[in-house]
Structure formats: C-alpha cells, structure tokens
C-alpha cells in the first residue's frame, strides 16, 4: 500500500510540474526532492509514471519548469558524485536522477529550439556562483557538468567499481584523488587482473551508460526536416 501511495505522490508531482497555472519555485526543495527520492525503486516506474504525452506537454507548455527540473537533476547528480556516493541515499538519488534524465532527453531533442539548451547559459539567473571572496564565477554549461559527473560516477567506489580500501564513514574515498589504474571495470592496459564483479555495480553502470547513449543520440530523436 505504501509503495502505491508513493507512486501516486510521484505522479501528482509530475502533473503539478506540467500544470500551466502553477509555477514551482526553484528553491522549493521539498518539491524537487520527490523526483529522486527512494519512493521510486525501478526504471519501469519512471517510464510508466512519466508518459511521453506529458513530457511533450511540459516541454511545450511549461518550458521553464522543464529547464529547472533538468538543472535540479544535474545538480543532485553532482552532489552525489562530490560525496563519492558514499551513502545509500546518495546512490538512490543518483540512479533516479539518471533514469529520469534518460526518460526526458529524447523528447527535449525532438524540438530544434531545445537542442542548444544543454550548452547554453543556465536559466533563471543560476549560471553564476560566488566564491568565498564574493567574486562571481560562471557555471559551466549543463551538458559539460552532466558529462563530467557521469564520467566520475562510472568509476565511483562501491557504486560502479569495487572498493580496494578499507574505509569508515569518517574516511570515505575521494573520487577526485583515485588513480586511474586503481579502479577499473576489466583487465587491460596497466592491470592484468579483472576486479571482482558486483551485480549492483553492473546495474548502476548500465543505467549511466543508457543516459550517455541518450546524450549522444540526439540525431535519432530529431523530426524529419
């Protein structure tokens, strides 16, 4: 029963996002958190609860809401990667963000005016951040941040590769300091031995690779000219 209620809540959030009469504020974190919470546990739910017609409606009727959603999904992915996906909460959030982006991208690429969205400035004045000194720094384009984050996640210990170090909650492995030959998928140049395989790591890799495939398949989603 609880799982059914969760799916209803997720479906209601999608409908609310698509409603033209109600603009969701970008700082309403309790609302946006619904899209990557543990309420949705598999990719089939994402595809069933986010129908194609509703994505197109969201794209055409509420483009600013779709833009904010994409930014929020990438931001949450970055947050999980920066913490090396150490917690179960981060891992669930990362996978659900990946799944939802995989669902959304084909419909974004259908329309020519959206094709430059991921390489354009971030909307709603969010393209700049401030340093500790109060100086402004431009944020990289959304596509750049997404691809860099996915590359990090593909070699994240205990998420997509097996960890080789004993660590505790106070000493997590920093993904940015990992040696490139230290964590691999298969034996090859620089490493003669294959790592131990983990079914969960394989599933996470597959989800991320599906999103990368969607990112690089823009032309197959374009309408005939």
Image: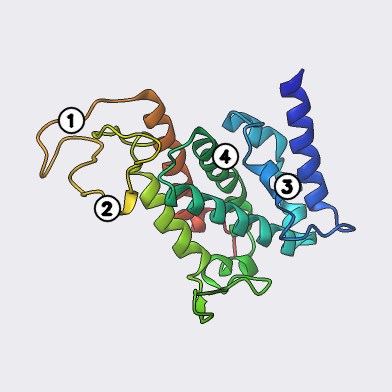
Q: Secondary structure at mark 2?
A: helix
Q: In this rendering, would 100 be left or right of 62? A: left
Q: In the rendered image, which residue does mark 1 sit on?
A: 194
Q: Residue at x 72, y 40 (%)?
A: 51
Residues at marks 2 and 3, CA–CA distance in whole angstroms: 33 Å
Give the percent coordinates (x, y) of residue 101. Answer: 57, 48
- The residue located at (64%, 36%) in the rendering is 46
- Residue at the spot of label 3: 30
Is disc 2 surrounded by few (<14), some (14 to 19) or many (20+) residues within 10 Å?
few
Task: Give the alpha-carbon distance from disc 3 to disc 4, as whole Å.
Answer: 16 Å
> Is 213 above or below relative to 117?
above
The residue singled out by tag 4 in the image is 96
Whether residue 185 sits left or right of residue 144 in the image: it is left
**SS at mark 4 in the image:** helix
Between 102 and 185, the residue placed more toward the observer is 185
Of the residues under marks 2 and 4, which one precedes in the sequence? Answer: 4
Foreground mark, 1 or 3?
3
| Residue 223 seen in the figure | no
Depth check, front residue: 46 or 85: 85
Mark positioned earlier in the residue sequence (2 or 1)? 2
Residue 177, disc? 2
Q: Quadrant of residue 47?
A: top right
CA distance for labels 2 and 4: 26 Å
Q: Residues within 10 Å of mark 1 (few under 14, many from 20)?
A: few
Q: Please report contact status of discs 2 and 3: CB closer than 8 Å, yes or no.
A: no
Gap in angstroms between the C-alphas marked 2 and 1: 21 Å
How much space separates mark 1 and mark 3, taking CA atoms?
42 Å
Query: Image point 59% across, 52% down: which residue?
Result: 73
Mark toward the start of the polypeptide (3 vs 4):
3
What x and y, as percent, mark residue 176? 31, 54
| Residue 222 visible in the shown view | yes
């Amino acid at each position: 029963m609880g799982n059914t209620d969760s799916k209803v809540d997720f479906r209601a959030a999608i409908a609310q996002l698509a409603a033209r009469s109600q603009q969701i504020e970008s700082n309403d974190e309790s609302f946006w958190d619904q899209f990557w919470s543990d309420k949705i546990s598999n990719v089939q739910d994402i595809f069933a609860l986010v129908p194609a017609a509703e994505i197109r409606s969201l794209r055409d009727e509420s483009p600013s809401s779709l833009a904010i959603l994409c930014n929020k999904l990438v931001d949450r992915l970055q947050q999980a990667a920066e913490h090396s996906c150490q917690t179960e909460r981060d891992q669930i959030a990362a996978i659900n963000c990946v799944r939802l982006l995989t669902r959304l991208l084909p419909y974004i690429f259908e329309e020519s005016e959206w094709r430059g969205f991921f390489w354009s400035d971030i909307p709603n004045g969010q393209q700049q951040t401030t340093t500790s000194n109060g100086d402004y720094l431009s944020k990289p384009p959304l596509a750049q941040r997404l691809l860099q984050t996915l590359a990090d996640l593909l070699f994240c210990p205990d998420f997509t590769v097996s960890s080789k170090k004993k660590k505790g909650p106070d000493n997590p492995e920093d993904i940015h300091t990992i040696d490139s030959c230290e964590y691999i998928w298969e034996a090859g140049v620089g490493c003669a031995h294959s790592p131990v395989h983990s079914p969960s790591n394989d599933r996470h890799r597959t989800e991320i690779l599906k999103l990368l495939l969607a990112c690089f398949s823009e032309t197959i989603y374009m309408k005939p000219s």
